[in-house]
Each structure stands twice: as structure tokens, then as C-alpha cells.
Amino acid sequence: MAGKHSEHFIESWGSMGVLWGINRSMARIHAFLITSEEPVDLDRITEALQISRGNASMCLKELRNWGVLQRVHVAGDRHDYYVAEPEAMKMLFLIARERKRREFDPALHSIRLLLTEGKTEKHEAVHARLTDFERLMTTIDRILTKCLEDEKMTKAVLNLLKSFIAR
């Protein structure tokens, strides 16, 4: 898929990826593969996105680690080709699970460490605020952990939440 709209999507996805804590190149490669109708090799990715082979190669490896793309082989060709996860729900599920692991879990751990150090107890208001925050984050953690155990569970929760949205 080529054209102005796909270029805009690639750049928008790249900007959003930075908010996920991944680099722009990684998100742009992911968007490029999402909009590709056929498997794409490293050379085509680097050419289309004007990035180095080394950068693209590292990004492809990391995207594979996230589980949002797969390496495939094309008959009669020795190059590795890549395709994006075709199911939007599965892709977003994998991204959410990885973001929880990389961002939410360390933040909750840090709050818990801060509270166990005892330094905040001297400042009642700060200690109470952090304790409330830790309790809220623990509740969210339990919900996220349960939802992100299983993609079907996540779909069920999303369908439940959709039922509360008036159209």
C-alpha cells in the first residue's frame, strides 16, 4: 500500500510509538508492515523509510520480541521477510501486555519501595497520598494482570466496557 495516507499513518504511528517508550524507527517499521500487502524484506524497509540497515535490523528483532510481527520465508528467496500480526486485537493485546511489563510494573514497584523505606512516614500527607496511590495502582495491576493473561478475557472485558458506551 503506497501513498499519502499510508505515509501519514506511518509517521503518526511513529510519533505514538515514542509515547510507548519505543523509538520512532521501530514504530515506523511496524506501521510500514501493517500497511504492506505482502511480506517485506530488510532492503525494502530501509529504502522506503530511509533508515540504516543496522537500525532496521535491531528494530525488527525488537518487534519480533514484542510478538507484533513475524519473520517469514518466501519460496525461492534466501532473504528474510517480515509481516505484521494481521489481527488488530491480538496486536494491541501484545502491545498492552509489553507496556504493562515495561512501564506500569516498575512504577508500582518504585512506589512500594518508597513506602517500605519509611521516609515518607514523617510527612503524613505525603505518606497518605502515596499509600492511596499504591492501593489504586495495585487494584489496576490486578485488573490488568487478569485481563492480560488471556486475549479472550481481554476481548470479553472490552465488549463489556463497550456495552456501557452510548452510541
Image (cartoon, rainbow, N blue to C red):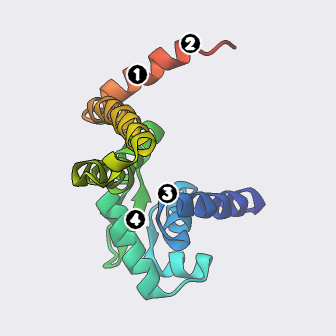
Look at the picture and state if 81 lies above or below 68: below
Q: Which residue is mark 3?
A: 20
**Which of these two is toward me, 122 or 132?**
122
- The residue sitting at 48% across, 82% down in the picture is 43
Secondary structure state at the residue bearing disc 3: helix
Q: Earlier in the sequence, mark 4 or mark 3?
A: 3
Q: Earlier in the sequence, mark 1 or mark 2?
A: 1
C-beta proximity under 8 Å, tags 4 and 2:
no
Q: Which residue is mark 1?
A: 157
Look at the picture and state if 24 lies above or below 13: below
Name the amino acid, label 2: Phe
Estimate how packed mark 2 is, as few (under 14), some (14 to 19) or many (20 or more) residues with alpha carbons within 10 Å.
few
Q: Earlier in the sequence, mark 4 or mark 1?
A: 4
Estimate how packed mark 3 is, as few (under 14), some (14 to 19) or many (20 or more) residues with alpha carbons within 10 Å.
some
- The residue sitting at 77% across, 61% down in the picture is 4
Q: Earlier in the sequence, mark 2 or mark 3?
A: 3
**Whole-percent x, y for residue 94 in the image:** 36, 46
Q: Quadrant of residue 74?
A: bottom left
Distance, label 1 to label 2, CA atoms, is 11 Å
Secondary structure state at the residue bearing disc 4: strand
**Whole-percent x, y for residue 156 in the image:** 38, 20
| Front label number (4 vs 1) | 1
Name the amino acid, label 3: Trp
Distance, label 2 to label 3, CA atoms, is 27 Å
**Which of these two is toward me, 116 or 161?**
116
Q: Quadrant of residue 49?
A: bottom right
Distance, label 3 to label 1, CA atoms, is 22 Å
Look at the picture and state if 132 lies above or below 12: above
Q: Which residue is mark 2?
A: 164
Q: Which residue is mark 4?
A: 82
Q: Is residue 57 left or right of residue 163?
A: left
